[in-house]
Image (spheres, helix red, strand yellow):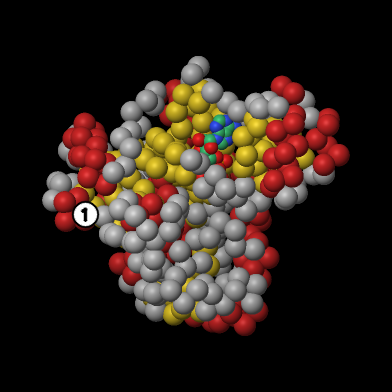
Amino acid sequence: GATLGVMGGGQLGRMFAHAAQQMGYFTAVLDADADSPAGLIAHHHVRSGYLDEAGLAELARHSAAITTEFENVPAQALAALAKTRPVAPGAAAVAVCQDRAAEKAHFVSCGVPCAPHALIETAGHLAGIDVSLLPGILKTARLGYDGKGQVRVRTREELAAAWAELKQAPCVLEKMLPLAYEVSVIVARGHDGQVVHFPLQQNLHRDGILAVTQVPSPDLTPPVQQRAIEAAETIASALKYVGVLCVEFFVLADGSVVANEMAPRPHNSGHYSIDACDVSQFDLQVRAMTGTPLVAPRLHSPAVMLNLLGDLWFRHGDTEVAPPWDRILALPGTHLHLYGKASARPGRKMGHLTITGAMAQQARDTALAACDLLGLERF
Ligand code: ATP
Ligand code: MG
Ligand code: MG
């Protein structure tokens, strides 16, 4: 079999490698960390930084095609790899996703609404900010994730303090919107322009980190669903995107759909697809990058996904204690995924639990039982 290369060795790379291996591919992972979740299971682990020329050359030498699992892989590294190998998604599309200002400009150019916002490049811009954007959230334009790199502000004074605290320019100030609920749409687009999508996921975030994903989305209405899918497909096509792309949306009380941000890769909110769909988001990443046919994935079981953050390992104090997996696995329909990370840290994504059921209510009831066993807040 051919070898598929991936930039980044985190859990997304690991689940990508599982899908690739199932389809008979070998995998090569580039990640500097000796213990990276994907590096541990790849056929070739290239231990180098993302901009190291020798490392990039080695990854290219092994790989028939290359993708990325790390959102912030330098776009120039993807561009360099693309000189000798097919790379999907491409550097230009990834670069748009890495910059909140460019990302919002892309949404607007696609006719997709996003939150009212302003770009703040220097401290001098702070005084001119329109107060209608307050209360708002100041977000660094680059490198934020899991709610890191953002501060909620109510007044001009708080805005100035947040700017000083973040110490990163440029930033985007976004108006705080009254969210009814949040959904994401995961699409896969092929080299030939064909686009397929997963059913919408409804996502609950806690402290800026995804906590719970439910499919089917309990609050979704058909018009919201249609708006979000059309928007995600337009956003992907206008980027000439190849691969799996996730677009996060806010849904407001009146049913309007507002694009939040996008991720140029399989997404945490799509992990349920491994256990609940006939084709997973990782399967579709393999298919898109190798130019094999895309098919519309089918949800065969309603599902709830619970993220397992490192906090769960410290419920009994400072020593790391694994949660009671035996009791979790005794519940019907539970699918435990652990990423093989050497040690737990609060906030660190250690794994996820997908609960499937014949009916949504069943999946939900079992998920609530799992929450109780794990000490997770119910949803
Ligand atoms: P991710 O880990 O998904 O990449 P992130 O750090 O890039 O997250 P955002 O997606 O921008 O952060 O925001 C995290 C969460 O904060 C959102 O899912 C939403 O719950 C809340 N949030 C962000 N922006 C707004 C807004 N303008 N109005 C209301 N809530 C918001
Ligand atoms: Mg983000
Ligand atoms: Mg987000």
Closest to the observer: 158 or 180? 158
Query: Which residue appears at 44% of the width and 70% of the height?
Result: 36
x then y, percent, for residue 336? 26, 55
Q: Quadrant of the N terminus?
A: bottom left
Q: Is residue 71 above or below residue 64?
A: above
Closest to the observer: 333 or 108? 333
Q: Is residue 94 left or right of residue 131?
A: left
Secondary structure of the residue carrying tag 1 is: loop
Query: Which residue appears at 52% of the width and 79% of the height?
Result: 47
Query: Which residue appears at 33% of the width and 45% of the height?
Result: 306
Is residue 135 in sight in this rendering?
A: yes
Query: Which residue appears at 73% of the width and 42% of the height?
Result: 163
x then y, percent, for residue 199? 37, 38
Closest to the observer: 346 or 316? 316
x then y, percent, for residue 351? 35, 56
Query: Image quarter for residue 234?
Result: top right
* Residue furthest to the right: 124
Q: Is residue 5 left or right of residue 317?
A: right
Amino acid type at mark 1: Pro
Residue under pointer 1: 324
Query: Image quarter for residue 22?
Result: bottom left
Query: Image quarter for residue 202?
Result: top left
